[in-house]
Image (cartoon, helix red, strand yellow):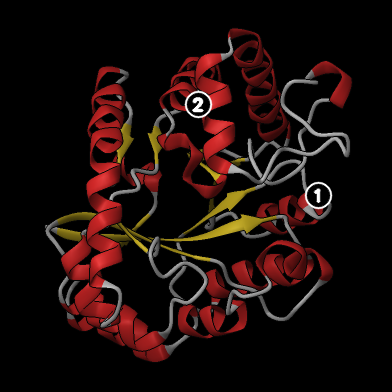
Amino acid sequence: MKAIIITGDDFGLALPVNEAIIQAHQKGVLTTASLMVGSKFTEDAVKRARECPSLKVGLHLVVVEGKPILPPDKIPGLVNTEGEFSSHLVQTGFRYFFRPGIRKQLEAEIRAQFKAFRDTGLVLDHVNAHNHMHLHPTVLRLILKVGEEFGLKAVRFPSEPPIRSWKASGKGLGCRLISWILLYPWLAMMKCMLQRAHIRYNNFLFGMADTGAMSLKPVLRFIQDLPPGITELHFHPATGRSPEIDATMSGYRHEEEFQVLTSGQLLQALQDAGIQRLSFSDLC
């Protein structure tokens, strides 16, 4: 069996992102979106999602490179003087792992984001984390603990097959192999944790090494060489630029990714290959 989940991340970040995700679902191949619940345009995203009930929506948990839901004085160990999460992923990962006091604050923030999602009234399709921070065992353990209270049933498994990914993109084989080797122990641990918690997950993910640059030709080549099982393709689409986008992802080709998602050529390729499009809810 070969099936695919096609996700748009950062739903709520900016109006052009919200517009792109809805159009990519209604006029293209997008099946799910991952909602940032603490962003400036979250309310707009939720309104659009309610008007488009066929779009499945999950929680895009933010614990690095962004703003928290809770006030800074409630989570002083998580934020800087500007009241924002650190953008230094490795340093933050060590702090989350080795400092128990910070872990308590982290649990409180994760619970606040789950609650904020529940308060939207949307059905929780899945959970993942900004910059794939749910690969971190401490973050994942707290997601599973808190998620049990909020009906969590599916989580993104960020395992990108390096050879297939390289064949599709035609560049960066060494970097893809090194990244996969370094991540392998964490992926193995993550899979064990998800299985113990009876949480469903995709088998593969495409779009990590080429994040922000998912152009049509590599996507079509990956579809032609799709591995058996459930593969997620994740994108960062937008209909145009905005200050919110440029502040953190100025190098991403958002508009090109939107064009890919609404390409008739991609839809035809999926139909010709007999590949079923799913959401995470379909795995449960």
The spot of residue 27 in percent (x, y) is 53, 79
Q: Residue 58: which numbered mark, if any?
A: none
Hey, which quadrant is residue 228 in on the image?
bottom left
Q: Residue at x 32, y 82 (%)?
A: 218
The spot of residue 274 in percent (x, y) is 18, 73
Q: Quadrant of the C terminus?
A: top left
The spot of residue 1 in percent (x, y) is 11, 57
In terms of depth relative to the viewer, which is nearer, 13 or 92?
Answer: 92
Is 265 positioned to the left or the right of 168 in the image?
A: right
In terms of depth relative to the viewer, which is nearer, 189 or 275?
Answer: 189
In terms of depth relative to the viewer, which is nearer, 137 or 151?
Answer: 137
Kind of residue sitting beneath label 2: Val
Question: Which comes before the other along the chain, label 1 or label 2?
Answer: 1
Dot 1 crowding, Cα within 10 Å, few <14, some 14–19, many 20+: some
Kind of residue sitting beneath label 1: Glu
The Cα atoms of the two marked residues, 1 and 2, are separated by: 26 Å
Q: Residue at x 43, y 73 (%)?
A: 29
The spot of residue 7 in percent (x, y) is 46, 60
Regarding residue 217, the answer to whether it shows in the image is yes
Tell me the element at label 2. helix
Is 41 positioned to the left or the right of 2 in the image?
A: right
Q: Residue at x 62, y 43 (%)?
A: 88
Regarding residue 270, the answer to whether it shows in the image is no
The residue at which mark 2 appears reads as 139
Q: Are marks 1 and 2 in contact (CB under 8 Å)?
A: no
Q: Residue 43: which numbered mark, if any?
A: 1
Give the total of numbered labels.
2
Hey, which quadrant is residue 103 in on the image?
top right
Is 182 positioned to the left or the right of 154 in the image?
A: left
Tell me the element at label 1. helix
